[in-house]
Image: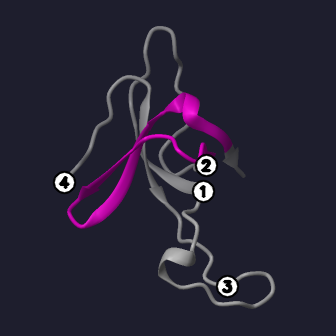
Amino acid sequence: MNIRPLGDRVVIKRLEAEEKTKGGIILTGNAKEKPQEAEIVAVGPGTSEVKMEVKIGDKVLFSKYAGTEVKLDGEEYTILKQEDILAVVE
């Protein structure tokens, strides 16, 4: 199934969370913090006021509580506005 966001929205898929701390402690389940880094899987067309500055495949950092989480075909995605994206990781 394809997903096509409307307006200035993007669909992202979170990258995997770290399973080990810098000190070597292995984290399990709920102890892991949700990552704020993701890959863009779909981009809306933008609006007359908002030009889209990201593209499919970009790795981005986004606001911690941004967007709406959805589950499609067993995969978890987040749909958010482009303004909630803080930076593109290069």
Task: Tell me the amino acid under the disc marked 1.
Answer: Glu
Q: List x then y, in percent, for residue 52.
A: 52, 26
| Left or right of residue 24: residue 34 | left
| Left or right of residue 51: residue 43 | left
In the image, 70 versus 58, the foreground residue is 70
Q: Which residue is mark 4?
A: 1
The magenta segment:
61-87
Q: Secondary structure at mark 1?
A: strand
Residue at horizontal 72%, vertical 81%? 21
Q: Earlier in the sequence, mark 1 or mark 2?
A: 1
Q: CA distance from mark 2 to mark 3?
A: 22 Å
Q: Secondary structure at mark 2?
A: strand
Q: Which residue is mark 2?
A: 60
Q: Earlier in the sequence, mark 4 or mark 2?
A: 4
Residue 83 in magenta stretch: yes
Q: Which residue is mark 3?
A: 20
Q: Is residue 57 above or below residue 68?
A: below
Residue 68 in magenta stretch: yes
Q: Earlier in the sequence, mark 3 or mark 4?
A: 4
Q: Which residue is mark 1?
A: 37
Q: Is residue 6 above or below residue 47?
A: below
Task: Tell me the amino acid under the disc marked 2.
Answer: Val
Toward the right, the furthest residue is 23
Closer to the camera: disc 4 or disc 2?
2
Label 1–label 2 contact, CB within 8 A: yes
Q: Earlier in the sequence, mark 1 or mark 4?
A: 4
Task: Tell me the amino acid under the disc marked 4.
Answer: Met
Task: Tell me the amino acid under the disc marked 3.
Answer: Lys
Q: Is residue 90 above or below residue 31?
A: above
